[in-house]
Amino acid sequence: MERVPVSTAALEMKCLPVSDKNGKIAIGLRDGSHAVRNFFIGTAAAALLSLYILDIDWLRILSRSGEIGTVFAKMAFFDFKSIEFTLLSFMETFSIMVLSTLYSIFFGMLFGLLGAENVVKNRTAALSVKAFSALLRAVPTPVWVLLTLVCFGFGAEAGIIGLSVHTAAFFTRAFAQAFEDVPADVIEAMEALGANRLQVIFCAILPMAMTQLIAWLALRFEINFAECTILGMVGAGGIGFAISTSIQNYAYGEAGIAIMIVFLFAFCMEQGFIYLKKKIK
Amino acid sequence: MQVPVACEREKKVYGWFFIALLGCFLAATVFTRFNPLVVLTEIGGVWDFVADDFFPPVLVCSDGILKSVVVTVALAVSSASAAALLAFTAAVFGSEYVAPFPAVAKCIRATATFLRNIPTLVWAFILFSSLGVGTGVGFVALVITSFAFMTRAFIEVIDEMSQDSIECLSAVGATFWQRIFHSVLPNCVGGFIAWFLYCLEVNIRSSTVVGMVGGGGIGMILFSYLKSFKYPQAAGIILLIAAVVILVDLLTNYLRRKVAG
């Protein structure tokens, strides 16, 4: 009996199985497979070109790679000398994260509604809101924080406001998308019943988009925590400041504790949101 | 009479979630003594700062700036691609359904969780202190977090695909690599590419930030301008960064529609 290798992938793709000269079934290319192949070739070429441009001294990195182990070993010996400072700066980071995310939800919701084409019936207005938010999003968060540091001085305010600018712009795009995903029939049905614009928003659009809003909120909490850590390293306060100063002063034990706190909190938050998403589903 | 719209259990979860959020909000406000009205009282100062110091933005078109933009983009592209290759290998050994050794799969997922939950810049600082500053070290720091992020995303893509075709292939005696290349890869390639493009977008921003603390590139130039109070030049660089980020976003959106859609 002739052996015919059958790929289930071919069956799933609904290709016509036509045997070629060797008696094998031609799997055939799915639509767009050429695009995928070209994409891979292009990416590989771009990556190789980039590596060539960067001209990295691999030998130096390899020869020093043993140092990483040494640093980690030093960090594993926790030094509880300045634990109070570390905990206080962690509290600050946590507060900046919570406040910036929650204030941004408010603004994101507002501008998200203004940017959703099915809420604002004016296409140009919605597009211009989205374009403006794209411009704000294009500047990385630490840059915003550096700018607010200049305006508001050193402290939590600068961190909260700087992060909020970027986060609100992020929410604007995400929420506008979520609102636009609400089926048009629902809105039409409400309008046919004589509901006004506010009733449509509060009784149809917001409740239907709620699951998506919470998913975005969870994602942004995780991102903002990482950003809060980062902004301490570029000069604002918080746990990032504790980490960068202790590393620069070769106090690896103190840095180890701070990094451990960051890791544990991020890990717990991730697990908590996974649990929450399961509950809501 | 009101018709209950949301199911009761769901309402309860939402309720607790909002109470928890409110509690965090109050605690944070008390701790930082943050008054949102400060934005309104300080708005004049902000406006003066933007209008006087930043405008008109000056963009010095020198070779150095052009070169540093290229370095930043190259850093993002190469680190995302290298991380994608590693993450694909890690994901096929780390996914519960296709992994040949369950113990190894657990280890891979635990490692990815550990690497992912420490921010890129912290990795950069750890590596700078052990390897010295430089573009290469920035590259390694970006690869670490992109690798961990994509490993998780790829594992999720593999777990979400229909498991029937893998089962079929194992039933007819396909080896591990045959299963990967004839079932997992064709089914998941769209999802993989979508996550890779997202990672590329994130990396463009991260490579700017890593540059600020010693990775080189455009971030380094911006940081030095801001530190020496050359605000018009800094404004020019910020607009340049925004332009690069928007261009890359447009490109990834185009590729997503074309390849992953």
Image (cartoon, coloured by chain):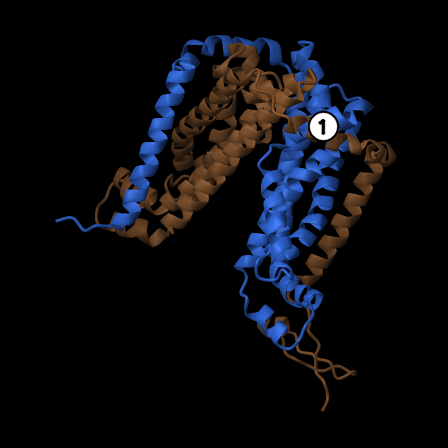
| Nearer to us in this view, A197 or A109 | A109
State the residue position of label 1: A71
Disc tally is 1
Q: Kindly identify the residue that appears in the image at 64 percent across and 46 percent down.
A: B197
Q: Is residue B67 left or right of residue A18?
A: right
Viewport quadrant of the N terminus of chain A = bottom right
Residue shown at the point (45%, 45%) measured from the top left: A274
Q: How far across and down, in percent of the image, does residue A34 sit?
A: 71, 61
- In-image side of B237 versus A275 (left or right): right
In front here: B159 or A252? A252
- The residue at the point 66 percent across, 67 percent down is B179
Q: Quadrant of residue A235?
A: top right
Q: Secondary structure at mark 1?
A: helix
Colour of chain A as rendered: brown
Q: Is residue A217 visible?
A: yes
Position above or below: A101 against A47: above
Which residue is outermost to the right?
Answer: A59
| Identity, as a three-letter code, of the amino acid under mark 1 | Val
Q: Quadrant of residue B139?
A: top right
Q: Is residue A165 above or below residue A221?
A: above
Image point (75%, 81%), residue name: A20
Color of chain B here?
blue
Q: Identify whether B141 is placed above or below B176.
A: above
Chain of the residue under label 1:
A
Inspect this view and state whether residue A131 appears: no
| Left or right: B178, with B13 as reference point | right
Q: Position of residue B36 (x, y in %)?
A: 39, 17
Q: Residue furthest bottom?
A: A1
- The x and y percentages for residue B64 are 80, 23
Choose between A239 and A172: the one closer to the eye.
A239
Number of other residues with Cα within 10 Å of mark 1, as a class: few under 14, some 14 to 19, many 20 or more = some
